[in-house]
């Protein structure tokens, strides 16, 4: 009996040795078979969305600072001054009737009066008819020259004789006026007017007549004045002298 139990124990040990291990732990990785890794030096393909950079915004474009260097281009010449009409002293024309033929209102221009430039109205005309002409001009301080036509007569301003051999057209009469005040005679209707550089004529008509007119002028060019029965008076310090 004592000899059978040791034999049974030896058989049990042999059976246990033949069975696989029952442990659940994973076996350790073998050092002889490492996980393969990529050794290629080529970069990965670039994405098509990042291959072309986006266009730069206009706000991100730097604006170059303005140049501080002085321009070497020569400055343009100053504009030529506007022509200034001749003149000198103011003279006044009064008439019971004034007719202007071929009249043209050129516009407001510069004229010289007593050494100063002022604005005046410029007219051109082919001839003038003046009834009951009286002209007054100050020839020196306190001294006036008065020229009066015979009562009821018509004085005229006509163009200077034209040289037929010349190809140039005859010059027109030029009148530079500070003020024209009177009654515009329009088909027998008298319309009060007062024309100055600040209030020039609104219309330009080739034939016009004024009654009870006073015209203050600085110059008259291009015409010959004829005064029937002219009487010239010089008035100085309220003392008058007459010459015929």
Image (cartoon, grey):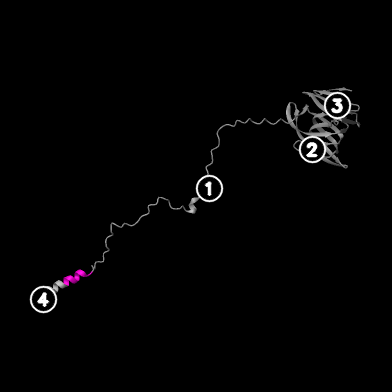
Do the residues under discs 2 and 3 have CB atoms within 8 angstroms? no
Any magenta on residue 15? yes
Residue placed at 17% from the left, 70% from the top?
14
Q: Of tags 4 and 2, which is closer to the observer?
A: 4
The residue identified by callout 2 is: 194
**Residue 19 screen position, x and y as percent:** 22, 70
Please, what secondary structure does the residue beneath circle 3 have?
strand
**Residue 232 screen position, x and y as percent:** 86, 24
- Which of the marked residues, 3 or 4, is nearer the chain's N terminus? 4
Specify whether residue 10 is in view: yes
Q: In this view, does 198 lie to the left or right of 153?
A: left
- Which of the marked residues, 2 or 3, is nearer the chain's N terminus? 3
Q: In which quarter of the image is residue 150?
A: top right
- Disc sitting over residue 4 in the figure: 4
Q: Of tags 2 and 1, which is closer to the observer?
A: 1
**Residue 17 screen position, x and y as percent:** 19, 69
**Residue 34 screen position, x and y as percent:** 31, 57
Q: In this view, does 26 lie above or below 221?
A: below
Boundaries of the magenta span: 12-19
Q: In which quarter of the image is residue 172?
A: top right
Q: Of tags 3 and 4, which is closer to the observer?
A: 4
Please, what secondary structure does the residue beneath circle 2 have?
strand
The residue identified by callout 1 is: 57
Specify whether residue 226 is in view: no
Which residue sits furthest bottom? 1
The residue identified by callout 3 is: 147
Q: In which quarter of the image is residue 1?
A: bottom left
């Amino acid at each position: 009996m004592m000899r059978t139990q040791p034999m049974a124990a030896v058989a049990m040990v042999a059976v246990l040795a033949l069975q696989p291990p029952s442990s659940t732990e994973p076996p350790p990785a073998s050092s002889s078979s490492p996980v393969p890794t990529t050794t290629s030096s080529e970069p990965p393909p670039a994405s098509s969305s990042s291959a072309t950079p986006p266009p730069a915004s206009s706000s991100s474009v730097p604006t170059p600072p303005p140049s501080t260097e002085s321009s070497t281009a020569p400055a343009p010449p100053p504009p030529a001054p506007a022509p200034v009409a001749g003149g000198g002293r103011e003279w006044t024309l009064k008439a019971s009737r004034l007719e202007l033929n071929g009249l043209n209102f050129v516009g407001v221009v510069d004229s010289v009066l007593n050494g100063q430039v002022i604005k005046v109205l410029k007219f051109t005309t082919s001839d003038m008819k003046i009834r009951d002409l009286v002209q007054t001009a100050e020839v020196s301080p306190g001294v006036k020259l008065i020229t009066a036509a015979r009562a009821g007569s018509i004085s005229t301003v006509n163009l200077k004789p034209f040289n037929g051999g010349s190809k140039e057209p005859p010059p027109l009469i030029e009148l530079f006026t500070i003020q024209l005040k009177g009654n515009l005679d329009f088909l027998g209707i008298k319309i009060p007017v007062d024309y100055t550089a600040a209030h020039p004529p609104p219309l330009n008509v080739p034939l016009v007549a004024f009654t009870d007119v006073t015209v203050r002028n600085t110059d008259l060019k291009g015409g010959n004045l004829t005064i029937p029965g002219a009487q010239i008076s010089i008035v100085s310090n309220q003392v008058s002298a007459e010459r015929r």
